[in-house]
Amino acid sequence: MNDPKISNHAESIALAKTLTGIRGLDDLTLGGLPAGRPTLLCGAAGCGKTLLAVTFLINGARDYGENGVFMSFEERAVDLEQNVASLGYGLADLVAAKKIVIDHVHVERAEIEESGDYDLEGLFVRLNHAIDAIGAKRVVLDTVEALFAGFTDKGILRAELRRLFAWLKDKGVTAIITGERGDGQLTRYGIEEYVSDCVILLDNRVDEQITTRRLRVVKYRGSAHGTNEYPFLIDDRGISVMPITSAGLGHKISRESVSTGVPGLDAMLGRGGYFRGSSVLISGLAGTGKSTFGAAFINAACHRGERCMLFAFEESQDQIVRNMGSVGIELKPHIDAGLLRFEAARPSLFGFEMHLARMNRDIEDFAPQVVVVDPISAFRGPSLEIHATLVRLADICKTRGITAVFTSLSSSGELMDESERSVSSLMDTWISLKDHEANGERNRLLYLLKSRGMNHSKQLREYQLTDNGIELVDAYIGTEGVLTGTARLAQEARERDASNTRAQGIARRRREMARKRASVERQIADLKAELDTEEAEMKTRIEQEEAQEVVYADDRSRMATRRGMKP
């Protein structure tokens, strides 16, 4: 899934590293920050420097058994604890357990007497005591500008900065030093980045009123690292970085089919459903039922016991659950069973990459087998950025074997818009939903534009949203085109009438034939009976005549005897 350059931690074995425990950051740095060395974390105000540094310390104390020291030159300890409490970090508990020390050093510029023999020795003593007190392995200094606020002599400043970084390295602690971004350069003084072994730049850009946070590893001595800009996310679950640049095309494929939740559509696909791990685009005009097809797929998957995640960008969870219930798709039981999770947010809440980072984090946390994004057309912005975001999301799902369904609102008209054209090439299956208006009514039609690896149906099919879900019906295609709805019903009724008439004619002719046959057979029987009667009478007469002839012969014989004649 990840950039090959950052996917193999084994490549960075030459340099000891310390895991930050920050999701994604350890991937793009190939194992974390340089162990026992200082790292400069720079950026403008509000980009998350202090939060990332605190997370580094908390993860170390909580997950890796490495205590830490946070030396603040701006925020008091109580303020810092309160600021991160909303993220559930439990910083105060770690401080109470003596796993983390927060030391607030108040630096007043007016009290600093800058002279040739001024140094940071006092700071080193104080920091050394804090480190030794808890055996700290991690140190954060926040911020370097506050520490050196009273210095105007660049010579002294450069010398003390070098001393500070060298002291931390000699101490053997893995340190993060935060710094404010300068005008036209990474840091305010332009020196810190040169004495640091690792430099990470945080950025917080605002484009068309949408903020996107990005992170870039500018420098990492002795180690390869991801060199691109990576979006990172700060929310109530902390900070996470998305290290993905490209998933490539080496992901595994599956030959298993999973039901779409619509039996008629399963039959149209020819294999009983979508390929598991494939990407599916369902596009159509408003009101064609795109979300319903997505919900039907989720419903079927949850019934199989699979985990599903729905990213909604136009409707809330409650809206979707209510609306799907009206067509017989009950999602609430799946939510209660922990099989379905909603993540609903307006597209304008974040930039594209922030949304992508959030979805990537949510997918990692929930590990779903099915993801539905409804709809991708809600994103507004340059088509190239939208396309890049969707490519990454599709790659995330493919790499994890997740079957992903993306819905998209199509523009009116027959021509495909730019967003559809750019996205469609990413998809394995593309289902187009359309409205067909005729005879004063509107009906819905579905057809499969493509489904890679399947001998799918090429037919138009009418579908209906019923109380029992989505049902496909055969579209009537006649000489006047496709007939749907009542026009189809009327035509089918006419055809049924014509068929009944033809059937009745055939039956009538069959009855006539039977009747004629019976009549002829009766005539034959009568003739035969007559023949038999005549034959019997004739036979009797013949027998009578033959008997009479015998009598005649006997009489002549007796008469001849009496006359003395010899017979």
Image (cartoon, helix red, strand yellow):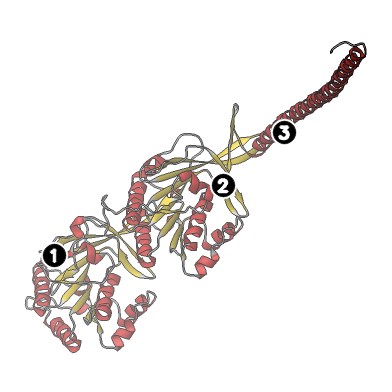
Q: Nearer the viewer, mark 3 or mark 2?
A: 3
Q: Are marks 3 and 2 in contact (CB under 8 Å)?
A: no
Tell me the quarter of the image containing the C terminus: top right
Residue farthest to the left?
A: 117
Mark 1 vs mark 3: which is more N-terminal? 1
Hey, what amino acid is under mark 1? Ser
Identify residue for label 1.
12
Q: Position of residue 555 (x, y in %)?
A: 91, 16
Q: Nearer the viewer, residue 410 or 200?
A: 410
- Image height check: is 539 above or below 385? above
The mark found on residue 287 in the picture is: 2
Residue 47, visible in the rendered structure: no
Residue farthest to the front?
A: 564
Hey, what amino acid is under mark 2? Gly
Q: Are marks 1 and 3 in contact (CB under 8 Å)?
A: no
Q: Position of residue 123 (x, y in %)?
A: 15, 81
Identify residue for label 3.
500
Q: Residues within 10 Å of mark 3 (few under 14, many from 20)?
A: few
Question: Element under label 2?
Answer: loop
Left or right of 422? Residue 115 is: left
Mark 1 vs mark 2: which is more N-terminal? 1
Left or right of 235? Residue 313 is: right
Left or right of 526? Residue 335 is: left
- Image height check: is 128 above or below 400? below
Query: Distance of mark 1 from mark 2, alpha carbons?
Result: 53 Å
- Image height check: is 89 above or below 557? below
Query: Distance of mark 1 from mark 3, alpha carbons?
Result: 81 Å
- Image height check: is 114 above or below 478? below
**Residue positioned 17% across, 80% down in the render:** 137
**Which quadrant of the view contains residue 182?**
bottom left
Q: Position of residue 184 (x, y in %)?
A: 20, 56
Q: Nearer the viewer, residue 533 or 99?
A: 533
